[in-house]
Amino acid sequence: MKEPQKIILRPLVTEKSTRQKDESRQYIFQVDRKANKIEIKSAVERLFKVKVNDVRTLNVLGKVKRLGRRLGKRPDWKKAIVTLREGDRIDFFEGA
């Protein structure tokens, strides 16, 4: 099994993810594209010492961007929406 730090790449902190965190205990992470739900669940539980109820994943396609005359493409990536059990929470920015 991979190390948890290689599965969970970074948290996604946006207005929508902040609202989901406050209202329904859902945290959003950018994860390794080859990771499955079981690996994501165990990585979050080991990294943050919480209990995960549910994991939903989706593949995000990179945007096609124009660079002068040429077309470029941002990389594809994978997003995981993790729901924690009642009473658990993850603090990304303590004191901020």
Image: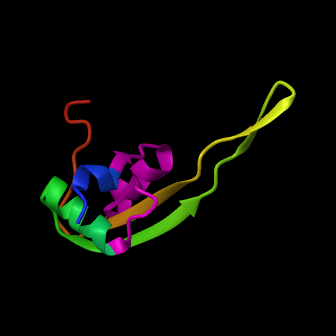
Q: How far across and down, in percent of the image, does residue 28 sit?
A: 40, 55
- Seen as rendered, the residue at the extreme left is 49
- In this picture the colour scheme is rainbow
Instruction: Look at the image and say whether residue 20 sits in the magenta stretch.
Output: yes
Left or right of 76: which side holds 34?
left
Location of residue 91 by image quarter: top left
Q: How far across and down, in percent of the image, does residue 54 sit?
A: 33, 75
How many marks can you see? 0
Residue at the image point whose x is 25% and y is 36% from the top = 93
Q: Could you say which is closer to the camera, residue 15 or residue 6? A: 6
Q: Is residue 30 above or below residue 41?
A: above
Location of residue 60 by image quarter: bottom right
- Seen as rendered, the residue at the extreme right is 69
Residue at the image point whose x is 36% and y is 45% from the top = 10
Instruction: Look at the image and say whether residue 90 sits in the magenta stretch.
Output: no
Q: Quadrant of the N terminus?
A: bottom left
Q: Could you say which is closer to the camera, residue 95 or residue 61? A: 61
Q: Could you say which is closer to the camera, residue 1 or residue 21? A: 1
- Seen as rendered, the residue at the extreme front is 1
Left or right of 84: which side holds 29?
right
Left or right of 59: which side holds 35?
left
Residue at the image point whose x is 55% and y is 62% from the top = 59
Location of residue 44 by image quarter: bottom left
Q: How far across and down, in percent of the image, does residue 25 sit?
A: 31, 62
Q: What range of the chain is rendered magenta?
A: 9-37
Q: Quadrant of the C terminus?
A: top left
Residue at the image point whose x is 64% and y is 42% from the top = 74
